Amino acid sequence: AQSVAQPEDQVNVAEGNPLTVKCTYSVSGNPYLFWYVQYPNRGLQFLLKYITGDNLVKGSYGFEAEFNKSQTSFHLKKPSALVSDSALYFCAVRERGSSNTGKLIFGQGTTLQVKP
Amino acid sequence: GAVVSQHPSWVICKSGTSVKIECRSLDFQATTMFWYRQFPKQSLMLMATSNEGSKATYEQGVEKDKFLINHASLTLSTLTVTSAHPEDSSFYICSARTVATGELFFGEGSRLTVL
């Protein structure tokens, strides 16, 4: 069965420090991988995605993520955290293939708290 | 980028009434839309996949007679929560997949509170 795991419910970092939000997945074949951010009472905003090519993907707001096939991971990173980055972050996967409708499988979410 | 609009953003209703939530793709066509439910501080749970002009495909455990989905055009899908009860209170989010590129865009969500 397909699944996405975000092992940390919450990540706390100080402003200016690097941050990492972890994600591992279990999907057959080579999936598409995504990161989304959600602010309170809002929908999801797209941050970045991995489709193919370079394992390091750069996205919005200075975020990046590294695809590691051997570890089936897609950790989200940012070199220098901002207080405004505090939000709920979701990792998601989507199977490749024409039979797939585009359905995303989401991780549990990780709350990022950046303190000044 | 593409915009997906959900209406209403907030709705409060009495137990036993029905509530309709709309999901519109404002500047693109979407053959497929997805409806999610999210409980506080939890992940998104896919409820159903809505395809234009055909019946929705519901995920296991989701009552199709309770959560009616209609996708009558390439820009509009609706979710109707019938005979709502307090346990139906939740944040409902839709996403739409573009015909042109297959990308997914999310609405801002609709918070339903059933008294």
Image (spheres, coloured by chain):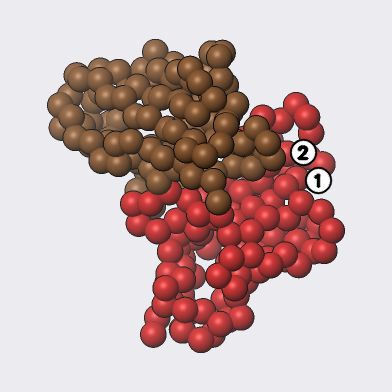
Q: Are marks 2 and 1 in contact (CB under 8 Å)?
A: yes
Mark 2 vs mark 1, CA separation in Å = 7 Å
Q: Colour of chain B?
A: brown
Q: Colour of chain A?
A: red
The image shows residue A43, relative to residue B10, as above or below, that is below
Instruction: Estimate how packed mark 2 is, as few (under 14), some (14 to 19) or many (20 or more) residues with alpha carbons within 10 Å.
Output: some
Mark 1 or mark 2, which is nearer the start of the sequence? 1
- As drawn, the label of residue A82 is none
Name the element at disc 2. loop
The image shows residue B69, relative to residue A15, as above or below, that is above
Q: Which residue is mark 2?
A: A96
Amino acid type, label 1 = Asn
Name the element at disc 1. loop
Q: Identify the image quadrant of residue B103.
A: top right
Q: Write the residue at 56% across / 36% down.
A: B28
Residue B33 image point, x, y percent: 54, 30
Q: Write the residue at 51% across / 86% down.
A: A16
A25 lies left or right of B88: right
Residue B17 image point, x, y percent: 20, 20
- As drawn, the label of residue A30 is 1
Amino acid type, label 2 = Arg
